[in-house]
Amino acid sequence: MPVIALFSGSCCREEEVVQKILDATGYELVTDKDLVAETSRRFDVEQGKLFSAMTRKASIFNNFTHEKERSLAYLKCALSDILRRDNLLLTGFAGLLPPREISHAIKICLIADMRYRFCAAIERENLSEKDALKKIRKDDESRATWVEYLYGNCDPWAAELYDLLIPMDKYGTDEAARLVCDNAGKQVVQVSDVSRQAVEDFALAARVGATLAREGHSIPVTVKDNKVIVTINKHVLMLSSLEDELRRIILTVPGVGEVETVVGPGYYQTDIYRKIDFSLPTPSKVLLVDDEREFVQTLSERLQMRHIDSAVVHGGLEALDVVDEDEPEVMVLDLKMAGVDGLEVLRRVKAQHPKVEIIVLTGHGSKEMEALCMEMGAYAYLEKPVDIAILTKKMQEAYRKLKENK
């Protein structure tokens, strides 16, 4: 029996349609929550990180950590095992993960016009008009982010993404469920040897992607009949060396037959490909906070020369937003900034995100201020101009403390 993969806009009566499909088919329901729980169990990844990978934009640190790519590869690995079973109803963000090549996975989208969804949010979820609109916009943004990440710049409700798009403002839940079941019964979407092999190729691509991400590489991977194809989309100074390294890593993955590397259109752009080295005893999530733009940019470049990548923000409020989205491991924080100053950032971060290690780096220091910052939870207090070797050492020590506490 085919897999039904159902993706829906919010306030489109998805739960009711899903229940009617289950009643009619006796299928096994697999939700995002189910997939995340299984992935977390298998790969020892926090469930929150997996949900964020699906529902939120890549964090400011993702270029240094590849967390989104790793999380997505792990989710695909877990999903590929699930897809080996029959009689599945896959719902939520995971409904967009099965590739087109798995022809027995029929993709369904439930959507409605804004007025229908707006009224449904008010009537069925008892929201105010303002909260209803806010909810729908936020939900749509998450879905658009997911679709863009998977398929490029694309409308999440674009008909070409689905086998069947059902306008819920024109169909009742009984009609919608019946339409899904009727289409799932068609011969063209039944399980075949070819579609089974597509599941195995999907699984192998996920395992290769996860292995590459753990080794510091972020490269698109496709598989056809156990042949792995990796596409290099950034300029590489020594292409042959990178190709040799990728082949060496990929051939360690069980099931790989042949490896082919190809150069994509992005290779000819100015962006330079960089492997991330996770073996170094340095933090991979570093946030520099300073409103002196030239100073902090120069500091970031000097740290990069010492194999420490960093994200940069130029104000306290921006820093707080970043920390709420994705906790840095180490923050280097200036004190004197317009608006929300460094002391307030220090207070809020240590209160709400106590694991973040904060190094205060200020040009307006005093013994009294140092004592206050340390009392508030700062790891270290340094004054400008700072010896880069001392700062690097303090960052490594802070990172070591964070790892020991974990």
Image: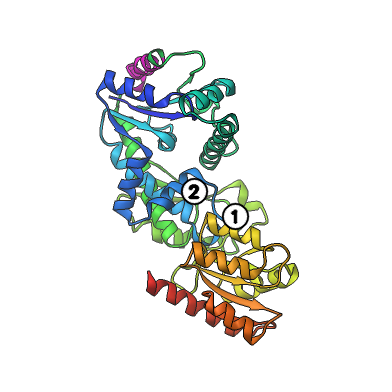
> Does residue 290 appear to the left or right of 330 in the view shown?
right
Looking at marks 1 and 2 on the same chain, the residue that comes earlier in the sequence is marked by 2
Which residue lies under the disc numbered 2?
A: 220
Which residue lies under the disc numbered 1?
A: 234
Dot 1, how many residues are within 10 Å of its Cα: few (below 14), some (14-19), or many (20+)?
Answer: some
Instruction: Judge whether residue 292 is colored magenta.
Output: no
Q: Is residue 354 above or below residue 269?
A: below
What is the secondary structure assignment of the residue under circle 1?
loop
Q: Quadrant of the N terminus?
A: top left
Residue 175 spot, x, y in % from top left? 40, 12
Residue 242 spot, x, y in % from top left? 51, 61
What is the secondary structure assignment of the residue under circle 2?
loop
Give the magenta range.
176-189
Q: Is residue 349 above or below residue 187?
A: below
Q: Quadrant of residue 251?
A: bottom left
Q: Amino acid at mark 1?
A: Lys
Instruction: Judge whether residue 179 is colored magenta.
Output: yes
